[in-house]
Amino acid sequence: MGIDELDGRLLELLAAEPRIGVLEASRRLGVARGTVQARLDRLQGKGVIRGFGPDVDPAAIGYPVTAFATLEISQGQGNDVRAHLASVPEVLELHTITGRGDMLCRLVARSNADLQRVIDKVVGFEGIVRASTAIVMENPVPLRIIPLVRQAARDAD
Amino acid sequence: MGIDELDGRLLELLAAEPRIGVLEASRRLGVARGTVQARLDRLQGKGVIRGFGPDVDPAAIGYPVTAFATLEISQGQGNDVRAHLASVPEVLELHTITGRGDMLCRLVARSNADLQRVIDKVVGFEGIVRASTAIVMENPVPLRIIPLVRQAARDAD
DNA sequence: GCAATCGCTGGGCACTTTGCTCAGTGACGA
DNA sequence: TCGTCACTGAGCAAAGTGCCCAGCGATTGC
């Protein structure tokens, strides 16, 4: 478990220039091509790298509004609610959490008005007792992982 | 703005097999290679595809605990707080939101005990009045975009 | 009605990269 | 001291890339 300094540099490099090839990466990192290939295989095998999915901006495909909804679920309905939420395309992410609410989900919508439609779709389901929604205004720190990778690589030294 | 059906299929294909090449993608989609190349360029140019960054699992690099913290910020301190949070590697994401709290951030930690350290680091800063944290237990719907892409592609038909 | 533009096709070309293999080397632990 | 392991550096055939071109049908503007 954990990654070393070379893994860290490789991940940083991949994050900075995702379409880079193995050969070019080996040149940048100053190691042999086989090494990069082996590291990549290992990182994927260990699950450190889940994939290289295209990072799609919801705003660019017509969904500029993001919101987080906290849902309170009635006892025993958890599985049904999960299946329901998973079937809604505007639900980008769903977590079960500790605390007052039972679930937290990330929503997107075409507009603030459209958000109402999405919320109605989300909460219009047996088992959801209450929902409280917070609309995202700014996103000062977009989802990132590199600073953490750097720290993990440093710690493992 | 928006994407058509071919864009949608291309994005789905890239999500399913990220390391696929342009040539192979053109074969799967049944279109000419130049078309795929042009579509890709256009999608990246329009910002639909932000990148192809490696999707790193925080759990696999030693941070298996995820939490969401709602922060209440005192007036006028917003920028300082943002800069502070951006400097904390364990803060993976930060949003400013409507509603009671002022900011919502996603945190990771090495353990539940370690989460205390992270929270102390996050809130130990002038301008943060209060913080309320919810620990993630399960993640029934991991961050996804394909269902939305499919819907956007269908709507644009 | 006609010309220009645009997106897609299908082909070709030089060049690079990949996937794979192999032998050699230094570090490490049994 | 002997394996084991990770890394190096090299070679090879196969495949993919970047780039070019001519043709073609649909849409747009004159």
Image (tube, coloured by chain):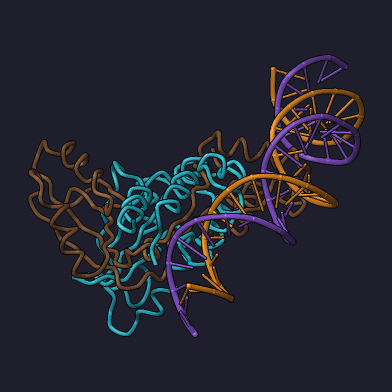
Chain colours: A brown, B cyan, C orange, D purple
Residue A133 x %, y %: 18, 62
State the count of labels: 0
B29 relative to A67 in the view: left or right: right
Q: In this view of the protein, which residue sits in the foreground, A130 or C12?
A: C12
Counting from the top left corner in percent of width and height, residue A73 is at 12, 46
D27 up-or-down from C29: above or below: below
Q: Quadrant of the N terminus of chain B?
A: bottom left
Q: Residue at x 45, y 54 (%)?
A: B7
Q: Nearer the viewer, residue B111 or A1?
A: A1
- Residue A12 visible from this viewpoint: no
Q: Classify residue B97 by image quadrant.
A: bottom left
Quadrant in which the C terminus of chain B appears = bottom left
Residue B88 image offset from top left, x and y in percent? 46, 64
Residue at image point 33% right, 48% down: B147
Please report the residue visible at 38 percent of the width from the left and 75 percent of the height from the top: B81
> Is B51 drawn above or below residue B111 in the view shown?
below
Seen in the image, is D26 located left or right of residue A117?
right
Question: Which residue is pictured at 41% across the width and 43% down the height?
Answer: B64
Q: In the visual, does C29 lie left or right of B84?
A: right
Instruction: Point out residue B107 in the picture as x, y percentages from the top left corner.
Output: 38, 56
Residue B43 at least partly seen: yes
